[in-house]
Image (cartoon, grey):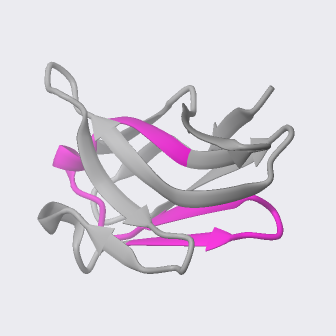
Amino acid sequence: QVQLLESGGGLVEAGGSLRLSCAASGIIFSIKTMGWFRQPPGKQRELVAVITGGSVTNYAESVKGRFTISRDNAKNTVYLQMNSLKPEDTAVYYCYADIVTRVISTVYWGQGTQVTVSS
């Protein structure tokens, strides 16, 4: 059974920083794309950042230059460094990973972690 465990959310003032982590565990052959989505209050879930198995990254326009996604393949972990946080970054953040187990690949999701940015 594969699980994604997120950590690092919390309350921070505008202009501050947070670092989210998401570790995959279980029977894992390899991990393809990993990334982060977020769901602001009353809004739909939106893509924040993705990183491929070859460490190619892509970001939502709203976070470019402020957020950095990275991964540690040895630890099956993806990170999201968030700097210069704004109140509009307030959301539940979800990580995902496209994981190959034996012969198939499946997208798994973390449980979500709350990030609240006060003005």
Residue 88 within the magenta-colored segment of the rendering: yes
Name the side, left or right, on which 119 lies relative to 11: left
Locate residue 27: give its quadrant.
Answer: top right
Q: Residue at x 51, y 56 (%)?
A: 34
Name the side, left or right, on which 108 lies relative to 50: right
Spot occupied by residue 80 in the image (x, y as percentages of width and height): 49, 62
User: Considering only vertical position in the picture, is 26 above or below 82?
Assistant: above
Locate residue 116: give its quadrant.
Answer: top left
Spot occupied by residue 15 in the image (x, y as percentages of width and height): 30, 66
User: Considering only vertical position in the picture, is 7 above or below 41?
Assistant: below
Spot occupied by residue 100 in the image (x, y as percentages of width and height): 68, 48
Q: What stretch is highlighted in magenta?
A: 68-97
What secondary structure characterizes most of the magenta part? Answer: strand
- The mark total stands at 0
Locate residue 43: give its quadrant.
Answer: top left
Name the side, left or right, on which 30 lies relative to 36: right
Q: Foreground: 107 or 46?
A: 107
Spot occupied by residue 54 in the image (x, y as percentages of width and height): 54, 80
Residue 114 within the magenta-colored segment of the rendering: no
Residue most extreme to the top: 42
Q: Foreground: 90 or 118?
A: 90
Q: Note whether residue 8 is visible.
A: no
Name the side, left or right, on which 84 lies relative to 110: left
Quadrant for the N terminus, please: top right
User: Considering only vertical position in the picture, is 63 above or below 43?
Assistant: below
